[in-house]
Image: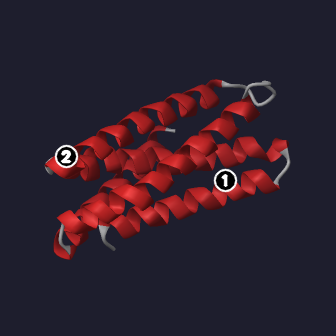
Amino acid sequence: MDAIELLKSDHDKVDKLFQKVKATEEGEHQALFEKIKEELDAHTHIEETIFYPKLKEEEELKDIVLEGIEEHRQAKMFLRELSNLVEESDKFEPKLKVLMEDITHHVQEEEGEMFPKVKKVFDSTTLQELGKQMETEKQSFKKSNRANA
């Protein structure tokens, strides 16, 4: 799987979880949030350690990468805040909603702007190699996070 296919697959997984949040009672949202957090933690990790550094090597991709990094910083702030809230907190649902809106916006920008530019700059062999590195790192990251949980 190439890097873009891998990231789109992650986007789809998270979107399905967002749809479940929208379709379920608030009492089920804490458990869904834990799954969302696990997926987003792994996704942002591979983007920041492998994908974004590779893109930053190319001048025409620097600005969009810097914006992506800033959006990740904001998402991580919400993830931390949500993790620290007790389920009964009045802040949980509004923060979860804003997180979902921010992530949806980020995904639209990546898929609508960043990925088409990346496809123009990098050939399919490079994207395949990047995808392999990202998949390996993602599995390792999830494994170490489960061990630390």
Query: Nearest the camera: 56 or 35?
Result: 56
Label 2 vs label 1: CA separation? 30 Å
Q: Residue at x 68, y 25 (%)?
A: 85
N-terminal label among 2 and 1: 1
Position of the N terminus by quadrant? bottom left
Crowding near the residue tagged with mark 2, few <14, some 14–19, many ≥20 C-alpha atoms within 10 Å: some
Query: Nearest the camera: 81 or 31?
Result: 81
**For residue 56, which numbered disc appears in the image?**
2
**For residue 92, which numbered disc appears in the image?**
none
- Colour setting: secondary structure
Q: Secondary structure at mark 2?
A: helix
What is the x, y in percent for residue 50? 25, 51
- The three-letter code of the residue at mark 1 reads Phe
* Image depth: mark 2 or mark 1 in front: 2
Residue 137 horizontal side relative to residue 144, left or right:
left
Residue 104 horizontal side relative to residue 91, left or right:
left
Q: Secondary structure at mark 1?
A: helix
Residue 42 horizontal side relative to residue 80, left or right:
left
- The three-letter code of the residue at mark 2 reads Lys
Residue 135 can be seen in this image: no
Query: Nearest the camera: 108 or 126?
Result: 108
Query: Nearest the camera: 52 or 119?
Result: 119
Q: Residue at x 26, y 61 (%)?
A: 118
Q: Residue at x 27, y 48 (%)?
A: 52
Which residue position holds label 1?
A: 18
Q: Residue at x 53, y 48 (%)?
A: 105
Residue 144 can be seen in this image: yes
